[in-house]
């Protein structure tokens, strides 16, 4: 679990840095592959489907508000690809119930509103660890 490879789909450089830091603070040291827009995320899913012997990430962390293709559309594509086997955590600035419900219906395991301060942002590591271990809290 500690070395689980993670696919991070996020366009904000500061958020990428904070997420990486939060993961490292929890000892989650697996490789983090970063994709910065929805179009490339969909291409990533297509590439995996074309070569099913390639290893899947152990977890996807994804923003909803992505450039080029919206995160909801990316999640729909993932839902019909090999990535459907991988737990997805949505990390978004939106706290709208419709977004939470829509992503849950598309298979997201957890929805986390992006925190507004550093101590809360560092808690993301614990929440991600809980998804990887199958615990709640």
Image: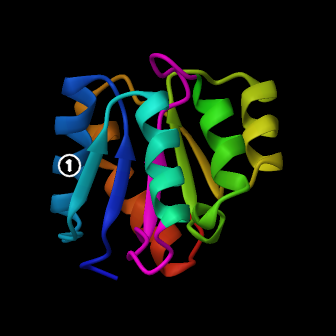
Give the residue at x 58% y 62%. Answer: 83
Give the residue at x 59% y 23%. Answer: 70
Residue at the front extreme of this rendering: 50
Q: Residue 82: x and y, percent?
A: 60, 67
Q: Which residues are magenta?
A: 51-69
Q: The N terminus lies in which quarter of the figure? A: bottom left
Residue 59 magenta? yes
Q: Nearer the viewer, residue 108 or 96?
A: 108
Give the residue at x 48% y 80%. Answer: 133
Residue 101 magenta? no
Residue on which disc 1 sits = 20
Q: The C terminus lies in which quarter of the figure? A: bottom right
Give the residue at x 23% y 51%. Answer: 22
Q: Residue 121: x and y, percent?
A: 32, 38
In the image, is residue 103 above or below residue 56?
A: above
Q: Quadrant of residue 32?
A: bottom left
Q: Nearer the viewer, residue 62 or 80?
A: 80
Q: Residue 9: x and y, percent?
A: 40, 40
């Amino acid at each position: 679990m500690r070395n689980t490879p993670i696919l991070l789909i996020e366009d904000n450089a500061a958020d990428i840095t904070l997420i990486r830091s939060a993961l490292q603070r929890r000892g989650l040291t697996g490789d983090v592959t970063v994709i910065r827009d929805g179009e490339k995320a969909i291409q990533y899913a297509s590439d995996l489907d074309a070569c099913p012997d390639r290893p899947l990430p152990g977890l996807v962390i994804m923003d909803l508000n992505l450039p080029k293709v919206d995160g909801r559309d990316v999640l729909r594509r993932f839902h019909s690809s090999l990535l459907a086997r991988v737990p997805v955590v949505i990390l978004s600035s939106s706290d709208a119930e419709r977004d939470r419900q829509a992503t849950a219906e598309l298979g997201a395991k957890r929805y986390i509103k992006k925190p507004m301060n550093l101590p809360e942002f560092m808690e993301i590591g614990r929440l991600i660890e809980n998804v990887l271990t199958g615990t709640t809290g």
